[in-house]
Image (cartoon, rainbow, N blue to C red):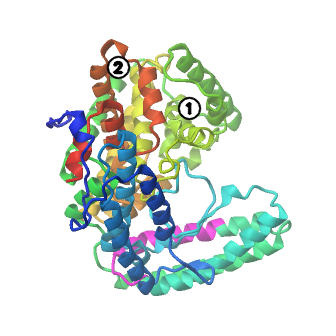
Amino acid sequence: MPRPMMSRPPVAVIAALVVTAGFTARSAPSRGARYEDLVALFREWRAFQKPKIVDGVPDYSAPAMAQQRQGLAGFQRRLSTLDTAGWPVAQQVDYHLVRAEMNGLDFDHRVKRPWARSPSFYVMLYPSRTDQPIREGPHVEGTIEMWTYPLPLAPERAADLATRLRSIPKLLTHARANLVENARDFWVLGIREMKAQSTDLSRLMTTLASANRDVAAAAAAARDATDQFVTWLEQQLPSKTGPSGIGVANYDWYLKNVQLVPFTWADEVALLTGELYRAHAALKLEEFHDRDLRPLNPVTTADEYRARFNAAVTEYMAALKARDVLTIRDYMEPGLRARSHFTPPDQFEFFNQVNDRDPIVMLAHDFHWWDLAQWETAPPTSPIRREALLYNIFDSRTEGFASAFEEMMLDAGIYDSHPRVRELIYAIVAERCAVALGDLRMASNEWTIEQAVRFASAQTPRRWLSEASRNVWGADGEGLYLVQPTYGTSYTVGKIQILGLLGDRARQLGDAFSLKRFLDEFTAAGMVPVSLIRWELTGQADEITRMAK
């Protein structure tokens, strides 16, 4: 679908605009406001946004949340008085980031209310690192990220982990009092996610049973509390009959004011439906094209996978260098090689079906790890962009770009020596669209989570997405998209925005355009919404101006 045509005022005029969507209009602008005033307000805001810690656990009680909501209005008023006229575009972009975060907390209080609706909000233990700036979806403050506790545990780290594990039973006691709303699908998902936490805690107990008995004992108590919480959730489930979606009007508001995505729910349904049709048709045509080639079968042993994966990394990096696709950094090749992980065919999830057939495909999506490495080794100069954005405001950039980069590398010829890779790419595009349509239809309350799962499984090519798989229920599927609407659509919609931006920049630069220049400029802007990167790179503020009205 082509980018909608919009009027574009002169850049000099746009740069002077101050927009205050969602704020109290009664406050007069503060003349002569400095960027440093925004930074100071941002730091205050970040401290305020966190819940208070009471007896070692975050307080999400009704009185505490009412107090936080009341205080939020003051921060929004203060932000709305900052007159950004005359600020450089990059600083005005930072203003919009702060505005979006405040709108995100406002939306949590008015609509999402995860502390009162979503049992999975209280999952505390996460065994592996996310590839995003912060963990996807709404989560309780202070999650235990086990990847930050390398084994064997140093004494001080063991003591810290034991203390944090001991907070889980208290947190789950609070959760029973806080979870007062009637949203059935949230409880269905919460039961699954809490059972997964119980399994993770059991593994931790086994791992640390002899070396760290105090930690193992704390994990055992946390597991028992989790199991008791699951029993309580299952007892309550029959009484949970209400809808879980946020509704189309709220989805539109969230896209516009928090995610800063210049589309509506209806726009995204059309975009994703069209992409799904295109992917299915392209896959069939590609299969016809490749009908005389040998089948692309998955590897069956760890040694075979390791050899194929390392060869793919070597070839991929050589191709990027030879074609001068982007600036090569020291962390890139080691970062990719660290992602090697063999999954036996009998344990396949959707992306294993792709990766174990040809690991070169997912190397492009692993740009996520390059993003994180760049962020850590050469952080943005902006003190605001140096922090991971809250409310997953980064997802059109992170997930959208990783998805776009797969197809960019396909069309740029990086995979030319792998003729069946196009089939795998089109299967991925179809899967992402199918699951994302569940995001949209759950939000509109047209589908339950079970219906979304069935649709995604049925619409994913080659029966590679099982209805029982973690991919479709968890952080890559309907489970996340139920609790974090718009995340599922960000892969494809963000991709469309980025490809549109590439075209805008190519037309703007003419012969001076190069893919390397574009990618270097794009990634240097940080992990912020694509609409804001477009403003910085092209000077075209039409999207953000329209959304901020």
- Closer to the chain start, of discs 2 and 1, is 2
Asked if residue 39 lies left or right of residue 201, the reply is left
Q: Which residues are magenta?
A: 179-200
Tell me the number on the disc at residue 238. none
Residue at (29%, 46%) from the top-left corner?
A: 85
Residue 420, percent from left and from top: 44, 24
Viewer-nearest residue: 357 or 161:
161
Residue at (68%, 78%) from the top-left corner?
A: 166
Decide whether the magenta segment is chiefly helix, strand or loop: helix
Viewer-nearest residue: 129 or 311:
129
> In the rendered image of this protein, does residue 8 appear above or below residue 417?
below
Please, what is the three-letter code of the amino acid marked with disc 2? Answer: His
Residue 539, percent from left and from top: 29, 33
Residue 83, percent from left and from top: 30, 53
**Circle 2: element type:** helix
Instruction: Tell me if residue 343 is in the magenta stretch.
Output: no
Q: Residues within 10 Å of mark 1 (few under 14, many from 20)?
A: many
The answer to whether any part of residue 185 appears in the image is no
**Circle 1: element type:** loop
Residue under label 1, please give it.
359
